[in-house]
Image: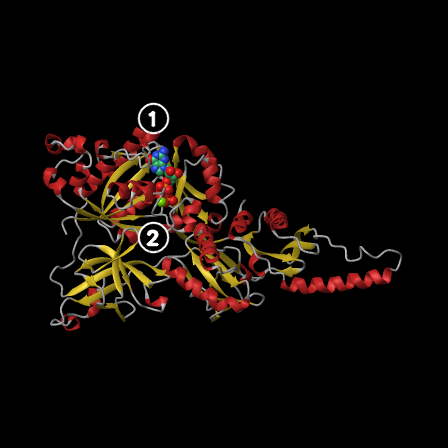
Amino acid sequence: MNNIRNFCIIAHIDHGKSTLADRLLEITGTVEKRKMKEQYLDQMELERERGITIKMAPVRMVYKPAEILNSKPEILNKSEIQNPKSLGFSVLNLEFANSEYILNLIDTPGHPDFGYEVSRALEAVEGAILLVDGTQGIQAQTLSNFYAAKKSGLKIIGAVNKVDLNIPDIEASVREVAQLLETSPDNIHRISGKTGYGVEELLKSVIQLVPPPKIIDENSPINRALIFDSFYDDHKGIVAVIRLFNGTVKNFNEVRLLAVNEKIKIKEVGFFVPQMKKVDEISDGEIGYIVTGLKDPHKIKIGDTVISQKSIRQPADKIQKLENYALPGYREPKPVVFVSFYPDDPDKHEELKRSLDRLKLNDASFVFEPDFSEVLGRGFKGGFLGKLHFEIISQRLEKEFGVKTITSFPSVAYKIKTKHLLKTFHGISKPDEEGFVTILNPKDLPDDYEEILEPMIKIEIICPNKLLGHVLGLKELFRWEDINTHMLADKIIVETIMPLAELISDFDDRLKSVSRGFASFSYESAGYKKNDLIRMDILVAGELVPGLSRILPKEGIEYEARKITKLLKETLPRQQFSQAIQAKAFGRIIARETIPALRKDVTGYLYGGDRTRKMKLWKKQKKGKKKLLSMAKVRISAEDFKKLLSK
Ligand SMILES: Nc1nc2c(ncn2[C@@H]2O[C@H](COP(=O)(O)OP(=O)(O)OP(=O)(O)O)[C@@H](O)[C@H]2O)c(=O)[nH]1
Ligand SMILES: [Mg+2]
């Protein structure tokens, strides 16, 4: 066990984690060179398409320094092995070179919407490489991930990446990282994940500095493992990704899932290499998977503890209460964006449910519950960690499961006081002690509400000093309050309070563009605040489109109404007939556009003056249209929602 190292790579988005992981896969011979492709661990179709990591990816690598040295005869001369400097390690020397190490790496996503993946990975490892793009320096998620890793008690190794780009700012980034880690710049690695420069030295540091796995109570009569991820495999069924904290798990072992209190017989155990590879057992301190044989996806709970007895002669439950063996597990994810999904075809309700269940198995931060709309029928309300998270789930539904859905505008949770009773799928909403009910769907806001509170966030933006003016230029557009600034090395941190609803408009894009990509942000919730808001409905061809209602500040609503009707005109498909698009608020129409018809003149072949015949045909066409209309559900893709939400 002394030769096992469990570690992850954490960083801000795009700082090069998955590219560094590629080099580690190569150095350790885990993936053959001819099979190598860029960001190898990003295996999901959407990850490759978008060039970002969405899921954490564990991989087990075996590293034999001596073998590597043998393959490089030019450096295999004893004096060099004993001269630590040349090989980048200082303590272990020959003993190190002759050993074999098991390296369990977890690549993590950088985008804050997938932060739950990172937080779970942190609990399965003992160390982290904090990677910083040398051309950018420290960014918001560098900070938030660093603090999270520190809190989890991990050994953190700093590395500045992309040194192949040879830009002068690199040393400034090194100083920033050194300051953050409270160490000397000499201890920060300078690497290039692209060329491989410095990567082997970094790996050696991981081996030297990251402690071997911690074992909780070696004499415990219980084997236990933490479930930190799960997914559905078409052939194997429900698979749990685990970290062993005590003992071993073997094929065909009977184990208990503690939180859900379910006994299962393990069908298969294995490692990720990075594909699933079956083995006989996973032992102390290692990371791997178990095929659970479970049919019901709700039986897998992320953060649950898998336990079994080490020996039958010591019945565990007699020794201690089983709950006492539970590992700490995870805090529940807190969704901030809510969207309702309805199947395109009402008959597909079950299929949609099954698909959402499977997605949830693969994405613990996604939550959903039943929902109902008079027009669209039975559906589900999904809770997401952000706008990108919603976009990804919605696209995965379509790509991986072939399920088409009608979705509502992404919304946040408002609290309102009203005389009306608010019906939800689960019955009538009960007011809290202060008389407020929470609404997740804008359509539920009555015009004559008494009071409305909107959720606020505390946002922290980090940018180079010289861009401060540009960043502050966003103040009015995004309704900032209480702005504070402070310095961190050559950067400035802006703290402000902003409505959460602004975050799901195009805040991220705007910040990126005013700062040319040099500013980044993180946020946390900051309670609720009373504001002057109203519901705006959208009518297409005179009919209210359920998913398009939104809650907006009264001030500037006409502008918002004109913008959305115009955008909808460009977005919605043309029909056989012209359609009016209207925005309604304060009980009246405040903006209007018309989508022209895909003209097909049914009277075109008639000539002469017999008007009644024409009228008859027009009438018939109108009737057909009416029928079409009642069926014309407005389907808007996640990408179009993004456009509609932009400022
Ligand atoms: N020049 C240069 N480019 C690099 C280097 N490492 C990564 N890149 C590029 O940076 C971009 C992002 O790389 P990724 O490895 O996907 O970054 P990531 O940190 O995994 O991104 P997320 O997982 O989405 O947070 C890609 O275009 C890489 O080719 C490097 O050392 N040098
Ligand atoms: Mg990545």
**Mark with earlier residue (1, 2):** 2
The residue drawn where x is 31% and y is 35% is: 161
Q: Is residue 513 above or below residue 398?
A: above
Q: Residues within 10 Å of mark 2 (few under 14, many from 20)?
A: many
Classify mark 2 as within 8 Å of ligand 1 or not, answering yes or no. no
**Residue pushed farthest right?**
609
**What is the residue that sits farthest to the front in this orientation?**
34
Q: Which percent across, then down, holds residue 611?
A: 86, 60
Between marks 1 and 2, how big is the CA–CA gap?
A: 34 Å
Position in image of residue 193 (x %, y %)? 31, 37
Q: How is the image coloured?
A: secondary structure
Say left or right for 454 vs 201: right
At x 67%, y 62%, the residue is: 628
- Going by the numbered disc 1, the residue's amino acid type is Pro
Return the mark for residue 331. Answer: none
Disc 2 designates what residue? Answer: 117
Q: Quadrant for the C terminus, please.
A: top right
Is 32 in front, or is 497? 32
